[in-house]
Image: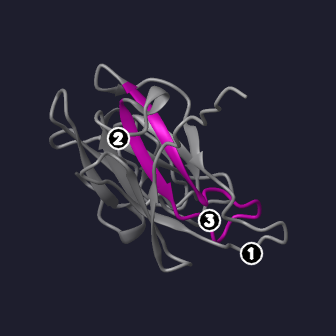
């Protein structure tokens, strides 16, 4: 993989269990504005060129660079996560205690933007998978880490699945590891 600079390197790895495919989440470059460049999750392809530092998101040219690599050499990422979400956490699951729509896919911790006018990230999302590939819109799993005045109360970083299938989330602001489980349905007895 030709990702060399700290801002364009994979921050976490995960193995998709059906195909044993290696996936990475990438915190992309800054300095191209609030809406560029999207962070992403992608399968790792042998000897693939992902564009840095001359291109981003496949064939998009970074005009601030002098060298022009041919567009056909740059591989487009599999799934864009949004610009400046700062997504350092990644965990694949097909066996979780969180049932239903969280059956198969990637949990992603989004630390959040520091240099974007409108904040992005600051949450945990789930990207559903089907047949070893992303298969739908991201699902917000845990939000509310930013106060109304814009201050961050938390910044989810790492995500993992524990031995009982619960989601573990490390919080960079609160210096805490949270354990997220599905609540049991409330049972009411007859009067």
Q: Looking at the image, which is closer to me, 33 or 89?
A: 89
- Say what secondary structure mark 1 lies in: loop
| Residue 44 x %, y % | 24, 42
- Say what secondary structure mark 2 lies in: strand
Mark with earlier residue (1, 2): 2
Q: Do the residues labelled 1 and 3 touch (CB within 8 Å)?
A: no
Who's the residue at 40% across and 49% down the image? 68
Q: Are marks 2 and 3 in contact (CB under 8 Å)?
A: no
Residue holding disc 3: 113
Which dot marks residue 42? 2
| Residue 128 x %, y % | 44, 30
Residue holding disc 1: 151
The relative height of residue 137 versus residue 22 in the rendered view (above or below) is: above
Who's the residue at 29% across and 64% down the image? 4
Mark with earlier residue (1, 3): 3
Who's the residue at 45% across and 46% down the image? 40
Which dot marks residue 37? none
Q: Please tell me how crowded label 1 is: few (under 14), some (14-19), or many (20+) other residues with Cα within 10 Å.
A: few
Between the C-alphas of marks 2 and 3, the distance is: 20 Å
Q: Would residue 139 appear left or right of 134 to someone viewing this image?
A: right
Residue mark closest to the camera, 1 vs 2: 1
Task: Tell me which segment is drawn in magenta.
Answer: 104-129
| Residue 156 x %, y % | 51, 64
Between the C-alphas of marks 1 and 3, the distance is: 12 Å
Mark with earlier residue (2, 3): 2
């Amino acid at each position: 993989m030709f990702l060399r600079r700290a801002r364009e390197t994979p921050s976490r790895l995960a193995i998709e269990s059906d195909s044993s495919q290696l996936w990475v989440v990438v915190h992309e470059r800054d300095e191209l504005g609030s809406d560029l460049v999207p962070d992403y999750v992608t399968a790792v392809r042998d000897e693939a060129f992902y564009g840095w530092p001359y291109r981003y998101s496949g064939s998009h040219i970074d005009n601030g660079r002098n060298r022009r690599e041919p567009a056909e050499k740059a591989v487009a990422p599999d799934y864009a996560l949004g610009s400046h979400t700062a997504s350092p956490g990644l965990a694949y699951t097909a066996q979780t205690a969180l049932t239903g729509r969280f059956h198969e896919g990637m949990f992603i911790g989004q630390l959040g933007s520091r240099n974007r006018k409108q904040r992005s990230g600051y949450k945990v999302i789930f990207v559903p998978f089907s047949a070893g590939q992303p298969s739908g819109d991201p699902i917000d799993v845990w939000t509310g880490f930013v106060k109304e005045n814009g201050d961050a109360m938390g910044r989810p970083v790492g995500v993992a699945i524990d031995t009982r299938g619960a989601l573990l989330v490390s919080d960079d602001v609160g210096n805490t590891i949270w354990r997220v489980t599905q609540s049991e349905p409330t049972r009411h007895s007859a009067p």
